[in-house]
Image (cartoon, rainbow, N blue to C red):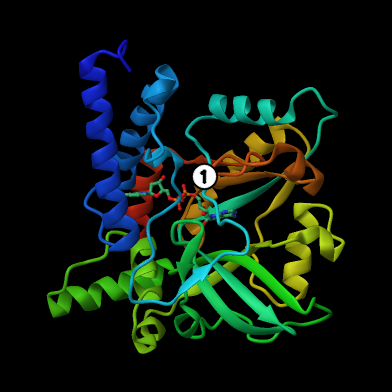
Amino acid sequence: MDSIPSEVLKRYQDLKEAIAGHDYLYYVLDRPEIDDDGYDALMRELLRLEAEQPSLISPDSPSRRVGGKPLDKFEKVRHSQPMLSLDDVFDLQELEGYLRRAQGSIEPFPWTCELKIDGLAVSLTYVEGVFVKGATRGDGTVGEDVTSNLLTVKSLPLKLKGPVPHVLEVRGEVYLSKRRFARLNEEREELGEPLFANPRNAAAGGLRQLDPKIAASRGLDLFVYYVVDPLSLGLESQGEVLRWLEERGFPVQRAWKVCYDLEQVKDFISLWQEDRFSLPYVTDGVVAKADPLSQWERLGRTARAPRWAVAYKYPPEERMTRLIDIEISV
Ligand code: NAD
């Protein structure tokens, strides 16, 4: 590290500490002190420094971590496969670079575009088609057993339809609708309690309550978008996965589309840039996933995210509008 100027080193250490502190507040306590745009700016600065000076990267860098540590009060669940985060891009040029790199020099393949639901990731296990266990992502390797709280989510199927394997694990997003969020904050204001920063924090707080009655009173909701080991079910593309999940009775967000080239991906993003405000829940971007599952094997993953998917985040101005939208939607 000798060649790294001391002010760069100092800035890097400060960024690492600041991000670690915000991660703890956000993921463990569900009580963020800065908004997501402020956090993303810190993370991007850290990533830029790491790209410029790769020798800076230490094993404890927040750029290598997924989420936060599970709380002590819940039973721990070790995930059968890591629950990863997603790489973010913030403009169309970056998105194009990401998709072109993933494409490489092979025959072009399609991308499935889905809306990015601003909630928190959960894993759901079914045995003989019956829901038996649900867990949060935690640090990606170990999560929290929140089964009793997930049982209060009315859209979560307790028994699946059609043929399913003996053990099935799916993953998705628990979220709070804009209407529920507004009502919850109104109630909290009347009681003089601190308000939730956004629906995601309110959902995360609800799912991690020790008393399931509190989780039930939040009225949490669910979308499922992933199945562990899809090839063993004879599924070959993300589009087939989403259809299969819907046929089994899972709530699947309907706006997804298979896009055959970059222009179609961009069209999907621009279509939903405005239209998403009319949805009853908050979406903060679009997730593009390689549609053929064979590409998932080929592209693999980094320590924190798959290389076969990328999240395009809508610009901050849009998110400002979103907050106003929440207020007027009640
Ligand atoms: P993320 O929210 O950027 O994206 C990854 C997650 O998207 C996945 O884990 C999954 O849960 C979710 N997702 C939603 N819809 C999906 C779909 N259709 N397909 C696949 N995945 C889907 O990543 P993260 O690791 O959950 O959180 C990081 C973000 O959290 C940061 O970008 C930042 O904005 C925010 N954050 C804020 C603070 C703060 O203090 N304000 C602190 C830490 C993190």
Circle 1 Cα neighbour tier, 10 Å, few/some/many (<14 / 14–19 / ≥20): many
Residue 188 in the figure: left or right of residue 246: left
| Residue 158 x, y percent position in the rendering | 63, 86
Residue at 39%, 71% (x, y): give it.
Answer: 179
List the single residue furthest toward the top. 3
Q: Which residue is mark 1?
A: 304
Q: Quadrant of the N terminus?
A: top left
List the single residue furthest toward the bottom. 213
Q: Is mark 1 within 8 Å of ligand 1?
A: yes
The type of residue carrying mark 1 is Arg
Q: Quick check: 107 above or below 325? A: above
Residue at 34%, 78% (x, y): give it.
Answer: 209
Residue at 78%, 67% (x, y): give it.
Answer: 244
Q: Quick check: 199 above or below 297? A: below
Residue 195 in the figure: left or right of residue 81: left
Residue at 41%, 21% (x, y): give it.
Answer: 55
Q: Is residue 259 visible?
A: no
Q: Quadrant of the C terminus?
A: bottom left
**Between 264 and 305, the one nearer to me in the picture:** 305
Quarter holding residue 61: top left
Q: Quick check: 19 above or below 141? A: above
| Residue 226 x, y percent position in the rendering | 66, 60
| Residue 143 x, y percent position in the rendering | 47, 66
Residue 77 in the figure: left or right of residue 215: right
Residue 109 in the figure: left or right of residue 68: right
| Residue 16 x, y percent position in the rendering | 29, 37
Q: Is residue 166 visible?
A: yes
Disc 1 is placed on an element classified as loop
